[in-house]
Amino acid sequence: MSSGTANGSSMELGECIRNTGFHEDDKTEDAVGGDEENRTSTVRMSPGGEEDTYTQIKPYAGMPKEVLLLYSGQARYRLPREILFWLTVASTLALVALTITVVVLSPRCLSWWQSSPVYQIYPRSFKDSDSDGIGDLKGIVDKLDHFQYLNIKAIWISPFYKSPMKDFGYDVEDFRDIDPLFGSMQDFDDLLAAMHDKGLKLIMDFIPNHTSDTHKWFNLSSSGHPQYKDYYIWTNCNTTHAPNNWVSVFGNSSWTYVEERQQCYYHQFLKEQPDLNFRNPHVRREMTEIVRFWLEKGVDGFRMDAVKHILEAKHLRDEPQVDPQQDPDTIDTEFELHHDYTTTQLGLHDILQDWRGEMDVYSREPGRYRFMVAESYDYEETEKTMMYYGTPYVKESDFPFNFYLMDLPTNLTGTGAQGLVNLWMANMPVGKWPNWVVGNHDKPRISSSVGQDYIKVINMLLLTLPGTPTTYYGEEIGMVNINVTIDEIQDPFGKFNPNASRDPQRSPMQWSDGPNAGFSDANHTWLPMHPHHTTVNVEAQQKDSGSVLSQYRALSLLRQAQLPLHRGWMCYVWSDADVFAFLREIDGLDKAFLVVLNFGADSVINLSAITELPEKLTLHMSTKQENYGMPVIKSSISTARGEGLLLEYSTHVRFNPGHASQCFVSEKACYLGVLDILYKC
Ligand code: GLC
Ligand code: MG
């Protein structure tokens, strides 16, 4: 075949014949002959040849392009092809739109610090692994199963830094080292790895306000080293007169004279805990590097200690007396002054926000959110505490600890309990996450102040309120304060004021009825065990379905498993001298819960007026009885003294829409039953 022929064909077939590939095919097919000849002959037609010859050839696999193009233009091939094309385009667009809708409408999943209670370990008292009578890091590793049993993921461990232990670790000698009493840095790394293996998160104490007086910075500062002289707060004074009337939280003047420097330094706590000078940028940088050091190691969060004390007024003027008539020379406790110049100074929140920023850098990896909780007691100054939530535009702590429920012992009524809950809910900035604390290493155990009868109902309150509960070790089994005689006092604050000693709430954890309650094999533990450990201990309570521990565990599991408890509305429905009742519901889900808590005497309440509640509810859990599944009539809900009830009910009518002022929700979401998903609403 001559190229002329090919060119001639090209004129008839238009664009398609210009394909050089076709020429090649043509030649090959010529050579093959037979059937092939048949097909190619139709292509090899003369100028002006009959085009409709092509139309008689059926399309076949491997047909030349020309034939293909001839058919592909025909309506019966073109139409289905176009339909298919547009269908593909439409379904791709629909899929993209659906994905965007799902992403936009999905509520944020709760983070680990929201979905689990926070458990506080006081490491001296949790578990001793080396038989010296003092708890340690390896001891914690031995007991990690306890948290899996309790369905707790977030563990805050009080300080284990190198320390002379004047304030049991809140006096830090080296922020980058572990105290040998608790173990080594290797033990810490092992603990963190073991915790992460089990899906547990570790929250550390960070103590920015002060160091120990044995910290190298303080030694250098005392001797006037040019680089360190302003690391602490120094001022001129003489041995007999403090520079001003400021007093320490632990009592007496907050100034101590140093002969070597012939000046006084400031300490908000013990004299062995000199306050760092955060107006010195070097100090800020050093402390930020320490935050980074632990973030690099992989810790999951910080409890920021004593934050309101971080800055003091530079002018050092006397603070106003609470009683202006009081003889100034007799002032020696924090309660006698208004702390206008020693707490919550301008600039404090910038410091915390900087650290939050550092933590955010380490929070970007999925599942590695770094959590911050701030500790600040601002008696009757709720707005000061709430500031630690940050602003809508600038993040700070995830929450400041809510200590209001610690006042339950002096407000032990249904109305009292509601009042304390409301103090937080009504003042918390919109969109923030609440939290609840009833005890820690600084406050007497609540079980001792309210009495044994109310231990279970308090745990039920803690675990059924919206937000994160914090549990101080031992609260899950109802541990109470120990008695410590004056000569046995360990706490330095207790040595100043025995009535304020914090030893009673720091006694060793009661694991079993064995020697030292299974806490230690030592002959002598750093604080005595509570004598009731033979009956109040983890081992015994695990076997008893009605124990404080079993109920704690059941509530912790329910809190996670039941959507209304996990992230639903909380609405107050009743409070009187004995009972506080609230409901938990989530829009879109018919299942809801009514929580009835008795903080007084035996009582019967009538909730008929709450028309959104059905006549009949079902007993899901009681702290006193075990007949679960029993029907309860809303007009007559009885609770015994200290009893807590969790009642389940089903309804199509939600309570919150008509009672906005009684209801609260954080991380609001609605449930879509057909798809079994949550969506933003
Ligand atoms: C915090 C701690 C407390 C400690 C104090 C000084 O308030 O909770 O135990 O004594 O700070 O660091
Ligand atoms: Mg030990």
Image: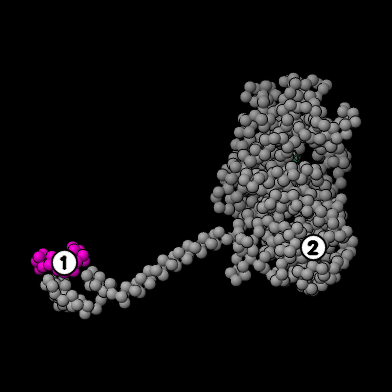
Name the residue: 62% across, 70% down.
673
Name the residue: 63% across, 56% down.
110
Name the residue: 82% across, 22% down.
241
Q: Secondary structure at mark 2?
A: strand
Can you identify the residue that label 1 sits on?
A: 10
Magenta stretch secondary structure, dominant = helix
Give the magenta-colored segment's residue range. Answer: 1-26
Indicate the quadrant where residue 552 lies.
bottom right
Q: Position of residue 18 (x, y in %)?
A: 18, 63
Can you identify the residue that label 2 sits on?
A: 573
Q: Is residue 5 magenta?
A: yes
Q: Secondary structure at mark 1?
A: helix
The residue carrying mark 1 has its beta carbon less than 8 Å from ligand 1: no
Q: Is residue 306 magenta?
A: no
For label 2, count other residues whose C-alpha is less than 10 Å away and answer few (under 14), some (14-19) or many (20+): some
Q: Position of residue 617 (x, y in %)?
A: 77, 71
